[in-house]
Image (cartoon, rainbow, N blue to C red):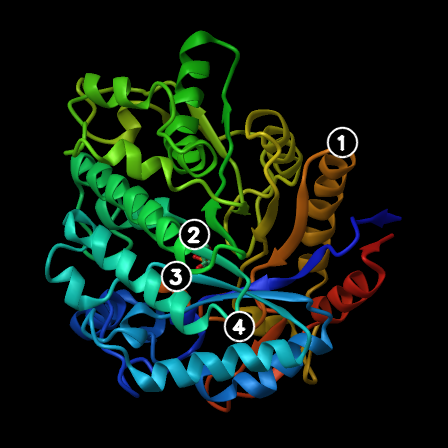
Amino acid sequence: MYTFPKDFWWGAATSAPQTEGASLSVGKTATTWDYWFEQQPELFYDQVGPTDTSMLYTHYKEDCKRMKEIGFNSYRTSISWARLLPDGKTLNPEAVAFYREYFEAIHQENIEPVINLFHFDMPMWLMEKGGWEARESIDAFGFYAQTAFECFGDLVSYWTTFNEPLVHVECGYLYGYHYPAIVDFKKAIQVGYHTLLAHAKAVEAFRRVLPNKKIGIILNITPSYAKSAQADDQKAAQISNLFNTKSFLDPAVFGHVPDGLPDLLMQHELLPNTKETDRELLAKGIVDFIGLNYYHPRRVQAPLAPNMPAKMPEDLYAAYDWPEKVINPYRGWEIYPEAIYDVAIMMRDEYRNIPWFVSENGMGVADEERFLHDQELDDTYRIEFMKTHLAYLHKGISEGSHCFGYHAWTFIDCWSWLNAYKNRYGFYRVDLKTQERILKKSGQWFKQVSQQNGFE
Ligand code: BGP
């Protein structure tokens, strides 16, 4: 029997843009997703945009009951910046009323709400001024954060500033999966740097407004494993970890950028524009807890034909196709549950054993309706996926890592960026046309795990 610590969080995560719907109504203005979909709907799978979701905006009451039915004691979602502050300054009373009622409904089911501020959903009014590339995004985010803390601080004890900040950096400024789909390493670094400062600005406001509550950040963790023990492969893995793990984790835990990163950026002419006061602000960004989203590791090797100075991260480390990898046949990502143990030990030994939780973990499945028969969806594959990850997490905890929870991705099938509804992850299946919800087998299993605080 794998038994987890007392009061362990069992639940799931999602986000405002992926579940709420009501995307351009009740006072909300456009985000980059609304805008991009309007401009180029063909980029989105099945041409499904951010308005076509599970419509939590109207279904949240029944959905909170569904969360309870499958044993959640905690649940993360986010606030939509463009809904709360449609022009960046003016508070939208309908948004305040909606989120207050939503968070109250979560409490009514005895579920702890964990509320995040930014989940890839840049408001268009800020994008038009340059988005995270513009220095003014830092104060704009600080103002938004403070407003959210003031409006909902009485209802929410656990807050997070960003979900996977590395993703809007990489996908928006290096690889073209998020708007503005620019390919520019130097801009990407500047965007990442402003995001770090915006995070610190929000934490600074938090300490003033809600000194007795807790704040964290949610990071995607993709531990980098080197192809071989040779020095150049090892160096590539180190650089990959510097960018992909330490770049946001070190500032959140220690209040400064990781050693080695400024020198590396200087060598490659990638240093961002800074101000003298930045160091002081960054030091204020230390959090109370960390959330780590884990799906798959990175396999890396020395770059094959590097440019000097680097034009892309691939000039510093290259992807390596590990022949022994196990693949999720329904999503294509590597499945490597052992990494969750390595991460647990890393948090214990290298990050002062700060309290942390698994804030996303799950298995995406394309065309999941093939497993739907007579209104039952047998997703045993997902149960196996979660069990193996939880077993490794348990091992890390039993060796002293301070992990206090496990949130699956996700509660209900949700809209996901360019892939829209291609890959399903939910404990509940949603039929987009009828809005009917069907509990999958994994949801029934998760309820037992939560009730027993573990599994056999
Ligand atoms: C994480 C994001 C989520 C969600 C998840 C699954 O990176 O925080 O928003 O999208 O990944 O990814 P996908 O939907 O692309 O399969």
- Cα separation, mark 2 vs mark 1, equals 32 Å
- C-beta proximity under 8 Å, tags 3 and 2: no
**Which residue is denoted by mark 4 in the rendering?**
155
Confirm or reject: label 3 Cβ below 8 Å from ligand 1: no
> Would residue 293 be visible to someone looking at this image?
no
Confirm or reject: label 2 Cβ below 8 Å from ligand 1: no
The first of marks 2 and 1 along the sequence is: 2
Mark 4 vs mark 2, foreground winner is 2
Horizontal and vertical percent position of residue 221: 50, 40
What is the secondary structure assignment of the residue under circle 2? helix
The first of marks 4 and 2 along the sequence is: 4
The first of marks 3 and 4 along the sequence is: 3
**Which residue is denoted by mark 1 in the rendering?**
399
- Image point (47%, 50%), residue name: 218
Q: Is residue 150 above or below residue 340?
A: below
Mark 2 vs mark 1, foreground winner is 2
- Circle 2 Cα neighbour tier, 10 Å, few/some/many (<14 / 14–19 / ≥20): some
Question: Tag 1: residue type?
Answer: Glu
Question: Tag 2: residue type?
Answer: Arg
Question: Tag 4: residue type?
Answer: Leu
The first of marks 3 and 2 along the sequence is: 3
Mark 1 vs mark 4, foreground winner is 4
Horizontal and vertical percent position of residue 9: 68, 58
**Which residue is denoted by mark 3 in the rendering?**
117
- Circle 4 Cα neighbour tier, 10 Å, few/some/many (<14 / 14–19 / ≥20): some
- Cα separation, mark 3 vs mark 1, equals 33 Å
Front residue of 230 and 446: 446
- Image point (51%, 33%), residue name: 223
Front residue of 60 and 320: 60
